[in-house]
């Protein structure tokens, strides 16, 4: 298996977002790779950096001279900082900028910086970095990596395109749950062989499970995260299909709560606590109503806003 296929299989959503951007030549100026350690952020960062300099394909080939220079961090226009050893200081950020301004003379190559453990940075370093990110003149691509994004300055986060990496070890877990989703809603859209690893299936599953997990305690947060996931593809039809799966599964879930059924004990316990604390028949009506409006000409963000609004009304009635 090539390393690219491996990355694609383990982080299909991240892969697809970057793949689309590379193909459209529309990369962001700065990325934040967020997720727990070991979920392949470093590998993706290296691959993305290689893709910026390699001339052999859309994704870096990993074998040519410049790809190897990136791998060994010897490429002249690659700067790497790491907050894993000691806190990143303002001087470190200024030195990084300075290096770029030296090599920029007459250079047409891509300039890239990586900041590993980016949360471990002093406030003045963060402010220096912020100024650097805001400078529109520099043709620099930045990749920040962090497993504690809550400790990053919000202003830094807002300058970056955040990509969320799933914990790798959990991929493929909960097979009974996947089979249940497949059997209930997903078999219309996927073949049995492909569905678990299909990007759209994973987006649907993430959305549904995020909803179930967070809605009861914080409906606004839950719907914000769900909406972001459901609308994350640049392909409208893909989003449409995933929204449909999400709504279908919510309908199944609320019906399961009402009839005390489900496939495993955890799911049943969750459904039972919904039934105990919330007006499930009304929630079910709200989702059915939204589902009825889901046609090919619907404005998806608007539909999800309305769904959020109506779910909140039930919640706070
Ligand atoms: Zn290459």
Image: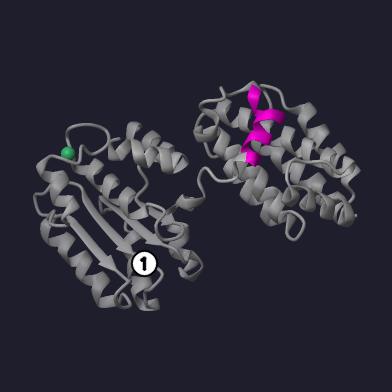
Main secondary structure of the magenta stretch: helix
Q: Quadrant of the N terminus?
A: top left
* Image-based side of 131 in relation to 165, left or right: left
Q: How many marks?
A: 1
Left/right placement of residue 203 relative to residue 310 reads left
Residue plotted at (78% across, 48% down): 268
Display colour scheme = one colour
User: Would you say residue 41 is visible in this rendering?
Assistant: yes
The image shows residue 207 at horizontal and vertical percentages of 63, 44
Instruction: Please name whichever residue, 240 or 204, is drawn nearer the observer in this view of the structure.
Output: 204
Q: Relative to 160, does residue 27 appear above or below in the rendering? A: above
- Neighbour class for label 1 at 10 Å: few (<14), some, many (≥20)? many
Residue depicted at 13% across the width and 51% down the height: 69
Which residue corresponds to mark 1?
Answer: 117
Q: Which residues are magenta?
A: 176-187
**Residue for point 50% across, 45% down:** 171
Quarter of the rendering occupied by the C terminus: bottom right
Residue 147 at x, y percent in the picture: 44, 63
Q: Is residue 100 magenta?
A: no
Q: Name the residue at 39% across, 57% down.
A: 38
Res 231 seen here = no
- 254 up-or-down from 75: above or below: above
Q: Which element type, helix, strand or loop, lies under badge 1?
A: loop
Q: Give how far across and how far down residue 132 sits, in percent.
A: 31, 63
Q: Is residue 73 left or right of residue 176?
A: left
User: Looking at mark 1, is its residue's CB closer than 8 Å to ligand 1?
Assistant: no
Which picture quadrant has residue 191? top right
Looking at the image, in which quadrant does ligand 1 appear? top left
Instruction: Examine the image and state in which quarter residue 306 appears.
Output: top right
Q: Is residue 177 magenta?
A: yes
Q: Is residue 228 left or right of residue 113?
A: right
């Amino acid at each position: 298996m090539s390393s690219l296929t491996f990355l694609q299989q383990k982080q299909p959503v991240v892969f697809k977002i970057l793949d689309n951007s590379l193909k459209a030549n529309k990369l962001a100026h700065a990325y934040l790779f967020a997720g727990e350690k070991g979920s392949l952020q470093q590998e993706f960062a290296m691959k993305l950096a290689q893709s910026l300099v390699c001339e052999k394909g859309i994704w870096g080939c990993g074998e040519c001279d410049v790809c190897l220079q990136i791998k060994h961090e010897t490429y002249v226009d690659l700067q790497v900082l790491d907050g894993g050893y000691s806190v990143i200081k303002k001087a470190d950020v200024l030195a990084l900028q300075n290096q770029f301004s030296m090599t920029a003379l007459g250079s047409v190559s891509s300039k890239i910086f990586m900041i590993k453990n980016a949360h471990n940075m002093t406030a003045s370093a963060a402010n220096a970095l912020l100024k650097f990110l805001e400078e529109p003149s520099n043709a620099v691509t930045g990749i920040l990596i962090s497993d504690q994004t809550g400790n990053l300055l919000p202003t830094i986060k807002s300058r970056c395109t955040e990509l969320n990496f799933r914990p790798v070890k959990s991929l493929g877990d909960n097979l009974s749950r996947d089979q249940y989703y497949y059997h209930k809603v997903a078999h219309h859209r996927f073949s049995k062989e492909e569905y678990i690893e299909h990007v759209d299936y994973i987006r649907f599953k993430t959305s549904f499970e995020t909803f179930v997990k967070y809605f009861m305690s914080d409906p606004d947060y839950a719907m914000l995260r769900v909406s972001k996931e459901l609308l994350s593809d640049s392909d409208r039809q893909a989003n449409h299909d995933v929204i449909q799966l999400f709504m279908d599964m919510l309908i199944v879930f609320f019906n399961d709560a009402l009839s005390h059924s489900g496939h495993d004990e955890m799911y049943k316990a969750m459904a039972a606590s919904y039934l105990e604390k919330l007006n499930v028949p009304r929630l079910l009506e709200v989702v059915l109503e939204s589902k009825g409006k889901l046609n090919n000409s619907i404005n998806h963000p608007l539909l999800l806003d309305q769904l959020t609004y109506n779910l909140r009304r039930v919640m706070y009635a």
